[in-house]
Image: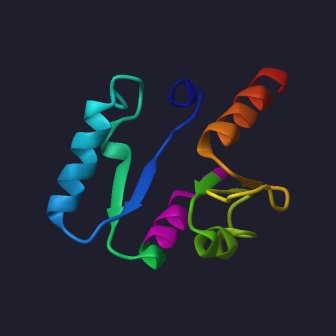
């Protein structure tokens, strides 16, 4: 649903071309591309710093990340940064699961 309303990019860290192929294959197997994510919007980097730089270049309105360091680095550089992957709720902008984060985003779309 998000891909219908927003330009969604998936940016991930990999260490080899084989890793890139595995990630792409897994995204294809779960139907991600059929549900709107464009294969050209799946981006890869060998380092977390490279991933953060890619995000800055894309200039998104919102960035969701599981790496707290990247979320902290991008805070102030990207208007909305969301950190997911905590074991319990933390400060505003932190979610314990991507599913909960997506539910909040969907609710914001409906009310906005």
Relative to 20, is 5 above or below?
above
x, y (%) of residue 88? 75, 57
Color scheme of the displayed model: rainbow
Which is the main secondary structure of the residues drawn in magenta? helix
Quadrant of the image occupied by residue 74: bottom right
Q: Nearer the viewer, residue 95 or 63?
A: 95
Q: Is residue 56 left or right of residue 109?
A: left
Q: x, y (%) of residue 8?
A: 50, 41
Nearer to us in this view, 38 or 20 = 20
Residue 29 horizontal side relative to residue 70, left or right = left
Is residue 102 within the magenta segment? no
Taking the spot 28% from the left edge, 50% from the top edge, the residue there is 23
Q: Residue visible at 77% across and 27% down? A: 107
The answer to whether 13 appears left or right of 15 in the picture is: right
**Residue lying furthest left:** 18
The residue range painted magenta reads 51-62
Q: Quadrant of the C terminus?
A: top right
The structure residue drawn at horizontal position 51% and vertical position 30%, both measured from the top left corner, is: 3
From this view, report whether residue 43 is shown above or below residue 45: above
Q: Position of residue 71 (x, y in %)?
A: 65, 67
- Outermost residue, front side: 87
Q: What number of labels is visible?
A: 0
**Figure quadrant of the N terminus:** top right
């Amino acid at each position: 649903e998000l891909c219908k309303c927003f330009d969604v990019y998936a940016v991930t860290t990999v260490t080899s071309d084989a890793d890139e192929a595995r990630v792409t294959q897994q995204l294809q197997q779960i139907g991600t591309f059929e549900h709107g994510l464009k294969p050209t919007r799946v981006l890869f980097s060998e380092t977390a710093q490279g991933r953060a730089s890619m995000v800055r270049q894309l200039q998104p309105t919102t960035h969701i990340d599981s790496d707290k360091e990247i979320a902290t680095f991008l805070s102030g550089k990207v208007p909305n940064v969301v950190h997911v992957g905590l074991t319990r709720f933390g400060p505003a902008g932190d979610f314990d699961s991507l599913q909960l984060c997506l539910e909040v985003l969907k609710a914001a779309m409906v009310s906005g």
